[in-house]
Amino acid sequence: MNERIKELVLEASDFMSETANWGHLPGSHNDIFHEKFAELIVRECADIAKNSQYRGASSDYYDGFNEALVYSANKIKEQFGVE
């Protein structure tokens, strides 16, 4: 498992511990962990797309390329219900 996935696992575990202990979310600990972990992965993928924009020059080609990356990031989040 790569380091970033390990970091996301820890982040989801922390979220699960914090919310489950205070009773903020319904569901089992596993459900809370799995939902948060999936959300973090989707958000990470969308961020990668959005942050891959070309910033070196301005032209119709690069503007279109950048718009497509932002569009893709938004569609990824929309597909999985992540804001």
Image (cartoon, helix red, strand yellow):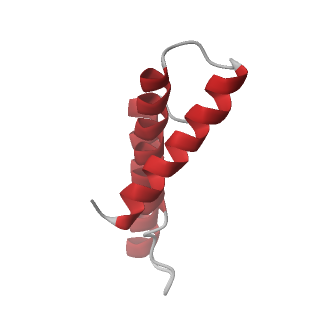
- Up-down: is 41 above or below 7? above
Q: Is residue 69 visible?
A: no
Reply above or below: 38 against 24: below
Coordinates of residue 79 in the picture (x, y in percent) = 38, 32
Quadrant the C terminus occupies: top right
Taking the image as shown, residue 25 lies to the left or right of residue 60, namely right
The furthest residue to the right: 22
Q: Give percent across and percent down for residue 35.
A: 45, 29
Q: Which residue is rendered at x = 48% and y = 57% of the image?
A: 47
The quarter in which the N terminus is drawn is: bottom left
Instruction: Find residue 38 and report its image quarter.
Output: top left
The residue drawn where x is 43% and y is 48% is: 9
Vertical comparison of 2 with 31: above or below: below
The location of residue 34, given as percent across then percent down, is: 41, 31
Q: Residue at x 65, y 28 (%)?
A: 19
Q: Judge from the rendering whether residue 66 lies leftward or rightward of residue 15; answer left or right.
A: left
Give 33 or 42, whichever is nearer the viewer.
Answer: 33
